[in-house]
Image: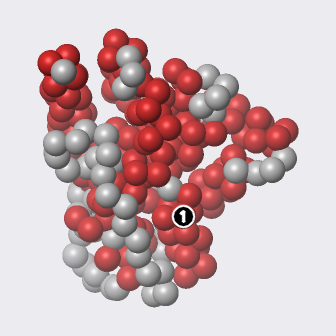
Amino acid sequence: MKKKMHLFVILLVSLVSVFAQEEDFFMEEDYSMDVDYPLNPAYEDINLDKENEMIQNLYSEDKKLVDKSIKKAIKDLDEYNPCVLYVLSNVYFEKNKDKAAQIFYIGQLRARIDANLCEDISAREAVSVLNEEFGPLINGYTLKDPRKLKKIVESAIDYVKKHDVNYDRRWINLYGMTAFYDTGDKPTTAPEEKWKEITESTIENYDTTFHDYLKTMEKK
């Protein structure tokens, strides 16, 4: 279990933002963490093998494997947690910039949702790490054309609204401080009966924050 935790954190930190409602909608600070601790027993059933394998394949030196993995990841986009979508957006960028950008923003919004579902506030910084690592390539492209940016982000929001996910939303919990000690009976994730409300609220906030950001761009 410790090995699984170690691999996940290495992928998240070394391969790979905005959770909080801050002025800069797209960029955040970088963060790091020590991984030399046993995993919280409450997280022992979080399985990230599928995501770790896909990320490794996307970064493979075998071009055929990379192409095959890109096609699979796009086809099964809802099967992978946001870490994969962030990586995919950068790997796929030169092949289809608009589609890659859409995938990035889908991943970003889903990461925010997952962060809000997580009761461990420290884990939410994982979104900042992902945005800091993978945002520059995508945002450097979309921010040059506000109309294109609007179209792509709105399509990403619409996609998230219409598609359910089939990955463990608790992936982000592994980035927080509670991953390193036994929390006992203390909840580490919001109860499932609140997930719909949290999801809808997060999407609404993301949409509002984005359109406010567009207005500031128009004034420049």
- Above or below, 176 against 111 in this view is below
Asked which quadrant contains residue 26, the reply is top left
Seen at 69% across and 55% down, the residue is: 56
Residue sitting nearer the eye, 89 or 30: 30
Residue sitting nearer the eye, 26 or 217: 217
Using residue 82 as the reference point, say whether residue 72 is left or right of it: right
> How many numbered circles does the render carry?
1
Badge 1 marks a residue whose secondary structure is helix
Residue sitting nearer the eye, 93 or 35: 93
Seen at 38% across and 82% down, the residue is: 180
Asked which quadrant contains residue 77, the reply is top right
Please say whether residue 45 is visible from this viewpoint: yes
Q: In the rendering, at what x and y percent does residue 105 appear?
A: 40, 33
Which image quarter holds the C terminus?
A: top left
Asked which quadrant contains residue 185, the reply is bottom left
- Above or below, 19 against 218 in this view is below
Seen at 44% across and 81% down, the residue is: 34
- Say which residue label 1 marks: 14
Which image quarter holds the N terminus?
A: bottom right
Q: In the rendering, at what x and y percent does residue 150 appear?
A: 32, 17
* Residue type beneath disc 1: Ser
Please say whether residue 197 is visible from this viewpoint: no
Seen at 63% across and 39% down, the residue is: 91
